Amino acid sequence: MAIQSFRTVAEVIDKANNTPFGLSAGVWTDKGSKLFNVTSQLNAGIIWGNTFNKFDPTSPFGGYKESGFGREGGLHGLKGYLKF
């Protein structure tokens, strides 16, 4: 886990997205509007709000950039095994 200081929300988003990886992210805040603002701008496969590593196993999961190999789980993960 990386913990860094910041001055503005824009700086947080820039720091978080300035990496070749993007498997997951976690955002902690006391304001729901700030949570939605930040998470909508992050490049990560899954983003948790005020928690970490809790998700529905039927949801699709995968990373961005150099993290992961596409999506697995949920309907996205099944589509690779189906013929239409």
Image (cartoon, rainbow, N blue to C red):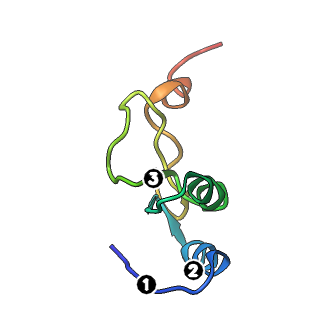
Q: At numbered mark 1, what does the secondary structure look like: helix, strand or loop? A: loop
Q: Which one is earlier in the sequence, the residue at label 3 or at label 1? A: 1
Q: At numbered mark 3, what does the secondary structure look like: helix, strand or loop? A: strand
Identify the amino acid type marked 2: Lys
Q: Looking at the image, which residue sits at the far top?
A: 84
Q: Quadrant of the C terminus?
A: top right
Q: From the viewer's perspective, is residue 5 above or below residue 73? A: below
Q: At numbered mark 2, what does the secondary structure look like: helix, strand or loop? A: helix
Res 83 quadrant in image? top right
> Residue at point 53% right, 46% down?
70
According to the picture, the residue beneath numbered tag 2 turns out to be 15
- Cα distance in 3D space between marks 3 and 1: 17 Å
Identify the amino acid type marked 1: Gln
Q: Which one is earlier in the sequence, the residue at label 2 or at label 3? A: 2
**Relative image position of residue 60 (x, y in whole percent):** 48, 36
Identify the amino acid type marked 3: Gly
